[in-house]
Amino acid sequence: MDVRSEIIAQFKQVSREQDKRLAPLNDQLALMDSGLDSLCFAIVVARLEGALGVDPFSTSEEAPFPVTFGDFVNFYENAAK
């Protein structure tokens, strides 16, 4: 599974588990408008670390925090290289 597909799968799974209504995912979607809250994002990040073997938030101190879904995907794709 590629990085983008894994991220989409985790967003969908966490939204179901946490009973959140997930907005349609596209690269321009602001993460704050995704329907997920901070707990959901913490779960997503923890699961992605397990699935992808990387946590870009702990390895990249100077990188700006992703604002959109596309930024989030790119953040992980770049860290996974």
Image (tube, rainbow, N blue to C red):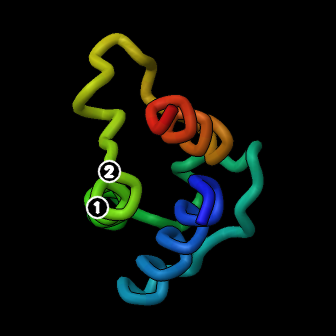
Residue occupying the point 41% across, 17% down: 63
Type of residue at label 1? Gly
When the figure is inspected, residue 79 is found, relative to residue 69, above or below; the finding is above
When the figure is inspected, residue 65 is found, relative to residue 23, above or below; the finding is above
Q: Which residue is mark 1?
A: 50
Q: Secondary structure at mark 1?
A: helix
40 or 59: nearer the viewer: 59
Type of residue at label 2? Gly
Residue occupying the point 67% across, 69% down: 23
* Side of 36 relative to 27 (left or right): left
Mark 2: few, some, or many residues within 10 Å (few <14, many ≥20)?
A: few
Q: Secondary structure at mark 2?
A: loop
Mark carried by residue 11 = none
Number of labels in the image equals: 2
Quarter occupied by residue 9: bottom right
* Side of 56 relative to 67 (left or right): left
Residue occupying the point 27% across, 26% down: 59
* Side of 14 relative to 35 (left or right): left
In the image, residue 36 lies at what x, y percent? Answer: 46, 65
Cβ–Cβ under 8 Å for marks 1 and 2: yes
In the image, residue 51 lies at what x, y percent? Answer: 37, 63
22 or 55: nearer the viewer: 55
Mark 1: few, some, or many residues within 10 Å (few <14, many ≥20)?
A: few
Looking at this rendering, what residue extends furthest in the top direction?
62
* Side of 2 relative to 61 (left or right): right
Mark carried by residue 53 = 2
Residue occupying the point 54% across, 60% down: 7
Q: CA distance from mark 1 to mark 2?
A: 5 Å
Quarter that holds the N terminus: bottom right
When the figure is inspected, residue 12 is found, relative to residue 40, above or below; the finding is below
Quarter occupied by residue 37: bottom left
In the image, residue 33 lies at what x, y percent? Answer: 59, 55
